[in-house]
Amino acid sequence: MLYGLTTLQTYVYYMHYSEDSSFTKFIVALTWILDTLHVLFMCHMLYYYLVKLRHLLLANVVLIHCR
């Protein structure tokens, strides 16, 4: 949800503030790119730990419960 808000804010900025300096536009684009990378890495991390390694997660839960 927050990524969508960042994307919308970036789009609105470029549509309404086209007269801003190139440096400001660069900073806005850089912020959006870094936010995109952050979302991609978080999705990858969640997939890796919750889907690919779910058997290890479930084994740890069973071992802790049996103690």
Image (tube, rainbow, N blue to C red):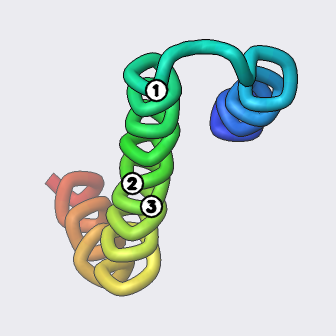
Left/right of residue 24 with respect to residue 2 in the rendered view: left
Q: In the rendered structure, find residue 22 and report the number of the disc placed on it.
A: 1
Mark 3 against mark 1, which lies toward the viewer? Answer: 1
Which callout, 3 or 1, points at the residue further toward the start of the chain?
A: 1
Secondary structure found at label 2: helix
Taking the spot 45% from the left edge, 80% from the top edge, the residue there is 51
Question: Residue flagged by tag 3: what amino acid is it?
Answer: Leu
Question: Closer to the camera, 60 or 13?
Answer: 13
Taking the spot 28% from the left edge, 54% from the top edge, the residue there is 65
Taking the spot 64% from the left edge, 38% from the top edge, the residue there is 3
For mark 3, does the 10 Å Cα neighbourhood hold few (<14), some (14 to 19), or many (20 or more) residues? few
User: How many discs mark residues in the rendered view?
Assistant: 3
Give the residue pinned by disc 3: 40
Residue 38 at x, y percent in the picture? 38, 47
Location of residue 17 by image quarter: top right
Mark 2 against mark 1, which lies toward the viewer? Answer: 1
Between the C-alphas of marks 2 and 1, the distance is 22 Å
Q: Residue furthest left?
A: 67
Contact check, label 3 and label 2, Cβ < 8 Å? yes
Residue 4 at x, y percent in the picture? 75, 39
Which callout, 2 or 1, points at the residue further toward the start of the chain?
A: 1
Q: In the rendered structure, find residue 37 and report the number of the disc placed on it.
A: 2
